[in-house]
Each structure stands twice: as structure tokens, then as C-alpha cells.
Image: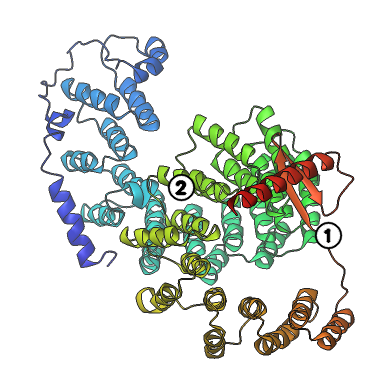
């Protein structure tokens, strides 16, 4: 059985419902009065007005020698309507076809079927399919492939692809390789491994089951299901392998992060004398991104240059991305600069790379170059540059990028909304972050979590908790990161009871096992409130050994409340976990110094000198002046605008002191 009884019942009900048209459907071409079929009937060729008519004027003058409605003309008009999504114009053509008596022409019926499927009107498509006197394999392939193309979000039900296949077999229509490719796509969309295996079995029994197309589709299906061994067995069984099959096998390994195996397939491919194409090297490079070996990437890069595939934009873009992922931002920039015609993907790879490595200035420079090159950035570009500007606290740049996104109509993208919330929050502009949040039509979990974290980071605990409650009311299931945000909000607000409530709710209501971040937030909550004994009991009850985050939170609380005994206990564990980190030694010496234990201060300082190569990194800060981010090091006199900034800070301090004096 390819479908469950419940699935078949749903499918049958949908087909039966499609036999009873709605009120809106009664106005469609299906219910028009059909003219008698008179071959001699003369009528002018119907040219729809508007967008389709403009596109068809050239065809009319060059191909329509007579003034009669041409089957060839209608076929091309329906193809164009399906390609461009012109449903109203397609329905007008359907009406004219019925009036002229061409409604029984098989090719036109298939073109109409394709039109309704491509436009997502499956009820119309099923009604037309039911009325067709002869349903060929082409008709069924259009229906099955249509459900694959649209996926779950646009189809009435992706299960209908399998139901169409069963009806096809019931009509005694023999499937071909296109049918099998569509079936495999339906199984991938449904994430149905077992049904996929049954389809594989059926394909093997069919006379079309030994073609390259079917084998490539099956290998691709098993690869997307993560069944690499099954995919490799199908690949090994195929005696005559074409380039598509090699590429699919290589991409399966790349998709599942098996770089070594992908490289092995590439070596085998070379031994058999098969020359790869751009897709081959793109997949191979993508798989090498998981190996962390720049040397191997450079070897493949040299091979690509010898074969002149470095001129392929897809290969060059992947090369930039792989260098960046392997930690070689300089080599990535060299590969980027060597691309003659750069597309948006190339720019995105480089901009994202600089953002990930904390070089927001260079990312911003590239973005400006991209705009000067008259290349329109997409939502990924803007989201990445927003992240870089947020790390620099460049609020002026963020506002400008926000305006650009609004102008280009990219503000509606969910990724843009999430990036704007995060960027405004990091710059301290909570009202702008909330406005960006309110403009998102359908917030997802990332959107809610970003807003909760923004409130929590700025100490707005009550707003963070209210947002979390609203998220639960909207039936959005929280994850571990959302609970980190709400626990952090409780910690900053001193809300001990509510913090314990949400911590216990993780296991009880949402089946989320707390990890080190949640325990660190809970310990920090108790430590800030002065409940060090309760925090110590929490540490003792953790099922695993507490890590650096949890111990660091507890150690900070002990330092704040000058509890030397518990601070010493936490410090000893931190010294074992991080013997080379000078921060722990320095904090412990400060704890001893705060209570006057100078002998212990000297002892800890000596331990730090013995264990660590300690050097003090000078403090660094940055501020935005005149739309440009200026960076200053502690006690820096070399910066050309240092004097101006120090004067501004001095004036600000005087104003604050004056305000406090007037209040007193």
C-alpha cells in the first residue's frame, strides 16, 4: 500500500468535493455554454487584453496566418499563462477554447491542467481531470509533479500526489520515468521514508526503473532522508553512470556533512574519466567546508583553476564561502576579488564572513561597494550587515539600512524583522526594536525570543515576561533559548519566585531538559538576590559536573556579597577547569583583597604568574560621531579625535554632577 486508509479517505473526499463547484466556480469556463463543433466556424483569434495580450502580439503577427482560433496559438498562450502565473487570462482562454469546440483536444487539455496546477488552483485542476475523456500519462504526470512543485505550503494536501498515482494505476495508465521522479519528490516533501522505499520497490519492478533519471532521483531521495548507505548501494548498482548521477551522489555526501566520503567519490569519478562540471565542484567545495582543512581547499582551488571552472560564478561563490567557513578570511577575499562578474551570492558570502569574524567595518565597506556597483542586495545581505552594525553600535547605519529595506520592499521578510529587532536592541533603542517587532505580521520563535532577550538585556524584566506570556498565548512553543531569555529577565529584575516557576515549567510543561545556561541563569538569579546557600544547593543538585558558566555566575555572586568561603570553593573548581585563564585568579585575589586577606592575595597572584602568560589587555570602546564609528583604546592620545571625545565626556560628567547636586 502506498497510502494509508485515512489518507485515501481524505483524498477521496477532496475529489468528491471538487465535483460540486462553488458559487465562484460557476462563473468559470467550465460552465460556459459550449458551441456546436463546426470545423468551418470562423472567429477572430481571441487576444486577451492586458499583460498577456501584450506578450502575445508578436506571436499573433508571425504565427497566425488565418483569422481563426489556432490550436497552436492557444497552446503557446496557455504555456505563457502558466509560466507567468496569469490565471485570469488563462481562464479567458479556456472559455474561448470551449466556445470554439476545441475543449476535447488532448494537448490543450493538458496545457489547461498545467495552468491550473502551476497557479495552485487544484480544485479546478481536479474538475478538469475528471471531465477529460482520455487521461494520458502526461496528464497524470502534470498532477503528480504539481504537488511536488508547490510543496505543503501551497498545496491543498501533499498526500494527493500519492493518491493521483493510485488513481493513475486504477485507470490502467502505465507510469514512465517522469512519473517516478514526481513520486520521489512527493515522498521527500512528505518526509515519508517508508513510502519512499515502497516507491523504490515499485520503480525496480517497472521497465522504466533502470534509467539514469530514476536512479538519480532515488539516490537523491535517500540522501535527503540521511540514508547514505542506501543511496550508495543504489549508486553502486548502476553500471552506466552519467554525470548527473555522479553529481547527485557527491551532493548527498555534502548535504550530510561527509566531506571525506564526498572527496572519495570525486577521486573515483576522476579514475573513471568522468569530467565534472560546475555543480560537481560546487558540491565538492561545500562538503570540504565541514573538514576545516584549508590546504585541501587550496588543492581543489588549483585544480579548478586548471580546468577554468573558476570563471563559473557558482563555483567561485562556493569557493569564497568555503574559505570563510574554514577560517581563512584572507584567502576568501582573494578569491572574491578574482571574480570578474560578481553576483549577490558572492557579496553575501564575503559580507557574512566579515560579520562572523567581527570585522564589521570591512563588512560595511563591502556593502557600500555593492551599492555603488548598482547591485541590489537581498534580505540576507541586509540582515548580515545589520548584525555587523549592531556589533559596532552604529545606530546611524542601522537607520539608513532600515530605510533602504523599506524602500526596496524587503522589510516584510521575517529575517529582516528579526535582524532589526536585534540591531536596535544592541544599540539601546528598545522603542525602535519594539516597533520592528510589531511590524512583523507572523512572528516566529526567533522573533519572539529576540524581543524577550532585548527586554531582558536592558533590565526590562516585566516587559520580557509579558512578551513570553503573550508568545505562549499565541501557541508558539518555546525552546531552550527562549527560556534563557526569560530566566535572564527574572535574574535582572530580582524575580526569584517567577524564575523558579519558569525553570520548573521547562521540564513539566515543555519537556525541555535544563542545560548549563539555564542553571547559570538560575544561580545568577539566586546570587543577585543574596541567596548564596540556595545557589550552592542548586550547584550540588546538578546531575552533571557544573561547567565554567555556572561556576562563574556563582563566583560572581560570592564576590558581590563577599562570601570568601564559597568563593574559594568555586575558585578552586574554576582553577581546575581553566588553569590558563588569568581572570579567575584576578577575581579571587580581589575577593581576598576586599576583606583584607593580603597573604592570600599574594599567593593567588603568584599562582597566576606561574600558571598563565598574563598580560593586561587595555580597555577598548567605540562611539559614533558624525555617522562614523570611532574606536578608542584606554588612555589613548594618538587618535586624531581623542581630545574632542574627552572634552565631550568631561562636559557630560559635569552635567551629571550638576544634576545630582541640584537634586540633593
Q: As rendered, which of 484 and 292 lies closer to the eye?
A: 484
Query: In the image, 113: left or right of 536?
Result: left
Query: Residue 162, how many percent across, how many down?
Result: 29, 57
Please rate how many residues cluster around mark 1, counting C-alpha atoms within 10 Å: few if below 14, some from 14 to 19, many from 20. Answer: few
Q: Quadrant of the C terminus?
A: bottom right
Depicted 81 relative to depicted 462: above or below: above
Query: In the image, 132: left or right of 334?
Result: left
Where does label 2 land, which residue?
Answer: 434
Q: Kindly identify the residue that appears in the image at 63 percent across and 54 percent down.
A: 283
- Return the mark for residue 26: none
Q: Is residue 383 visible?
A: yes
- Return the mark for residue 618: 1
Query: Residue 508, how many percent across, how many down?
Result: 36, 79
Depicted 423 relative to depicted 86: above or below: below
Query: In the image, 621: left or right of 230?
Result: right
Query: In the image, 161: left or right of 296?
Result: left
Q: As rendered, which of 134 and 460 lies closer to the eye?
A: 460
Q: Quadrant of the N terminus?
A: bottom left
Whether residues under marks 1 and 2 lie with C-beta atoms below 8 angstroms apart, the answer is: no
Q: Kindly identify the residue that appears in the image at 44 percent across and 60 percent down.
A: 464
Query: Residue 235, how many percent across, how many down?
Result: 55, 64
Amino acid at each position: 500500500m502506498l497510502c494509508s486508509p485515512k489518507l485515501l479517505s481524505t483524498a477521496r473526499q477532496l475529489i468528491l468535493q471538487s465535483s460540486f463547484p462553488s458559487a465562484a466556480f460557476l462563473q468559470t469556463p467550465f460552465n460556459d455554454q459550449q458551441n456546436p463543433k463546426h470545423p468551418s466556424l470562423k472567429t477572430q483569434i481571441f487576444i486577451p487584453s492586458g499583460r498577456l495580450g501584450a506578450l502575445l502580439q508578436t506571436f499573433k503577427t508571425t504565427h497566425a496566418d488565418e483569422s481563426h482560433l489556432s490550436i497552436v496559438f492557444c497552446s503557446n498562450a496557455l504555456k505563457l499563462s502558466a509560466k507567468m502565473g496569469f490565471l485570469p487570462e488563462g481562464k479567458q482562454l479556456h472559455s474561448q477554447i470551449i466556445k470554439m469546440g476545441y475543449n476535447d483536444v488532448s494537448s490543450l487539455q493538458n496545457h489547461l491542467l498545467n495552468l491550473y496546477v502551476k497557479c495552485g488552483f487544484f480544485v479546478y485542476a481536479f474538475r478538469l481531470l475528471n471531465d477529460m475523456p482520455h487521461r494520458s500519462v502526461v496528464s497524470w504526470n502534470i498532477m503528480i509533479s504539481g504537488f511536488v512543485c508547490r510543496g505543503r505550503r501551497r498545496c491543498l494536501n501533499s498526500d494527493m500526489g500519492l493518491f493521483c498515482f493510485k488513481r493513475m494505476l486504477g485507470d490502467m495508465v502505465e507510469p514512465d520515468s517522469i512519473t517516478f521522479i514526481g513520486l520521489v519528490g512527493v515522498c521527500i516533501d512528505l518526509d515519508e521514508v517508508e513510502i519512499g522505499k515502497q516507491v523504490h520497490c515499485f520503480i525496480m519492478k517497472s521497465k522504466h526503473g533502470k534509467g539514469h533519471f530514476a536512479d538519480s532521483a532515488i539516490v537523491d531521495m535517500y540522501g535527503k532522508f540521511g540514508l547514505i548507505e542506501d543511496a550508495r548501494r543504489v549508486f553502486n548498482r548502476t553500471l552506466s553512470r552519467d554525470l548527473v548521477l555522479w553529481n547527485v551522489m557527491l551532493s548527498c555526501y555534502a548535504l550530510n556533512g561527509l566531506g571525506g566520503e564526498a572527496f572519495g567519490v570525486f577521486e573515483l569519478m576522476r579514475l573513471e574519466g568522468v569530467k565534472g562540471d560546475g555543480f560537481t565542484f560546487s558540491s565538492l567545495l561545500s562538503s570540504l567546508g565541514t573538514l576545516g582543512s584549508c590546504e585541501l581547499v587550496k588543492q581543489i582551488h588549483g585544480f579548478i583553476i586548471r580546468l577554468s571552472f573558476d570563471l563559473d560564478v557558482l563555483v567561485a561563490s562556493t569557493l569564497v564561502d568555503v574559505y570563510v567557513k574554514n577560517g581563512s578570511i584572507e584567502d576568501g577575499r582573494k578569491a572574491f576579488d578574482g571574480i570578474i562578474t560578481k553576483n549577490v551570492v558572492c557579496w553575501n558570502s564575503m559580507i557574512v564572513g566579515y560579520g562572523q569574524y567581527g570585522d564589521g567595518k570591512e563588512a560595511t565597506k563591502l556593502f557600500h561597494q555593492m551599492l555603488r556597483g548598482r547591485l541590489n542586495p537581498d534580505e540576507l545581505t541586509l540582515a548580515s550587515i545589520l548584525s555587523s552594525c549592531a556589533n559596532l553600535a552604529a545606530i546611524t547605519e542601522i537607520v539608513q539600512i532600515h530605510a533602504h529595506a523599506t524602500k526596496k520592499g524587503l522589510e516584510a521578510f521575517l529575517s529582516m524583522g528579526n535582524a532589526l529587532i536585534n540591531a536596535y536592541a544592541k544599540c539601546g533603542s528598545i522603542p525602535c526594536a519594539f516597533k520592528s517587532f510589531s511590524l512583523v505580521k507572523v512572528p516566529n520563535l526567533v522573533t519572539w525570543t529576540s524581543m524577550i532577550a532585548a527586554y531582558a538585556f536592558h533590565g526590562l524584566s516585566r516587559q520580557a515576561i509579558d512578551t513570553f506570556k503573550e508568545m505562549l498565548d499565541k501557541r508558539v512553543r518555546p525552546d531552550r533559548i527562549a527560556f534563557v531569555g526569560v530566566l535572564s529577565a527574572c535574574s535582572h529584575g530580582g524575580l526569584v519566585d517567577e524564575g523558579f516557576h519558569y525553570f520548573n515549567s521547562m521540564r513539566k510543561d515543555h519537556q525541555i531538559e535544563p542545560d548549563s545556561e539555564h542553571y547559570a541563569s538560575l544561580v545568577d538569579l539566586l546570587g543577585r538576590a543574596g541567596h548564596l546557600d540556595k545557589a550552592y544547593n542548586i550547584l550540588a543538585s546538578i546531575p552533571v559536573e557544573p561547567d565554567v558558566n555556572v561556576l562563574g555566575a556563582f563566583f560572581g555572586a560570592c564576590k558581590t556579597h563577599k562570601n570568601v568561603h564559597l568563593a574559594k570553593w568555586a575558585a578552586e573548581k574554576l582553577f581546575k577547569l581553566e588553569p590558563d585563564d588569568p581572570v579567575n585568579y584576578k577575581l579571587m585575589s580581589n575577593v581576598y583583597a576586599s576583606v583584607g586577606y593580603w597573604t592570600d592575595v599574594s599567593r593567588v597572584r603568584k599562582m597566576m604568574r606561574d600558571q598563565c602568560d598574563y598580560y593586561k589587555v587595555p580597555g577598548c570602546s567605540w562611539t559614533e560621531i558624525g555617522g562614523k564609528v570611532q574606536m578608542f583604546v584606554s588612555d589613548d592620545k594618538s587618535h586624531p579625535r581623542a581630545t574632542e571625545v574627552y572634552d565631550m565626556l568631561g562636559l557630560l560628567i559635569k552635567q551629571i554632577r550638576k544634576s545630582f547636586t541640584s537634586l540633593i
